[in-house]
Amino acid sequence: MPTDPALKRDLMTKAVQVRKLVLQAIHKAGAGHIGGPLSMVEIALAMYFKLLRIDPKNPNWPDRDRYVLSKGHSSITLYIVLALRGYFPLEEVFTFDAINSRMQGHPDMTKTPGIDMASGSLGTGSSPALGMALAARRLHKDFHTWLHLGDGEIQEGQVWEMAFIADHYKVDNLTAIVDYNKVQQFGFPRDENLKKRYNPMIQVPDKWRAFGWNVIECDGHDFDSLIPACEEAKATKGRPTCIVAHTVKGKGVSFMENDFMWHARVPTKEELDRAIPELDA
């Protein structure tokens, strides 16, 4: 079913706002990531404004749904979405990566409201997310756990150890979302000019199916594709689900899209001034 038109318009407006704030906050900080945060905007908005059962006034509510951003280097997008949802003032995101700020380069669950799991080393959000889902079962809770993974990140063995165990225990209250933008920072170059790199991992849907997971593919930038995929995943019983969300690294800015050089590059003032009008267009 297509997303409610009013909700979709609101989410699309917020997506532009989030992307502009990502660029502005990274520029101000002089550090951070661009490509991955821009590719995950719609996923994070769908989570916090449609799918998650949460209470921003009570971030530690025991019955809340959990959202684990395992690709923690993309934290700036999560901070902005949390701020828009009411967890803390929006102005605070401009303290990103500053000393003593709650907006650190990687999420810290002990400092920042709304963070369900600290993350940074790639792959390490996967096991805690599985633990949360198993805990819900043992405690007879009905909250759902969402695990957000990067496609470069799923080269980590810990992810597949988690996938094996989740299938073994038929953990159907866990959904993994792979932000499949097909570009990573490091890896063997495809050509001598170092302009492109090989996909981080190929046959991603087939690999999750091989581990026993239900797999749903969607357009990670289209709310009419993304939200129904998430709702279908949550309704699936008897096994965990992986949503392979096809996305574009650096989405929204033409000279950043699909360019691995923008994985962790800070835009200059001139580049920022070029990028913002593109997002407004």
Image (tube, helix red, strand yellow):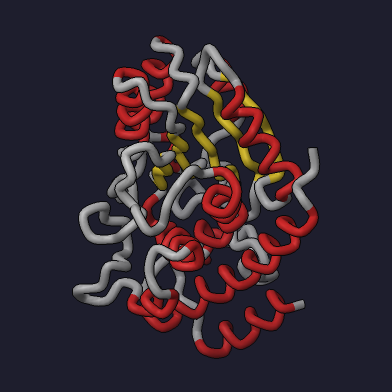
Is 185 rendered above or below residue 272? above
- Depth check, front residue: 262 or 232: 232
Query: Compared to 94, does 4 lie above or below?
Result: above
Kindly tell me whether residue 164 is visible in this rendering: yes
Residue at 31% in and 45% down = 117
Left or right: where 68 falls relative to 14: left
Q: Position of residue 199 (x, y in %)?
A: 58, 42
Classify residue 259 as left or right of residue 186: right
In the rendering, at what x and y percent does residue 152 appear?
47, 43
Front-most of residues 255 and 49: 49
Q: Residue 82: x and y, percent?
A: 44, 61
Name the residue: 49% across, 43% down. 53
On the image, which quarter does residue 256 sit in?
bottom right
Which residue sits at x=33%, y=29%? 158
In this rendering, the answer to whether 176 lies above or below 15 is: above
> Which residue corresponds to the image point at 73% horizontal and 56% vertical from the top-left?
8
In the rendered image, is residue 190 in sight? no
Q: Where, by quadrant of the figure, is residue 129 drawn?
A: top left
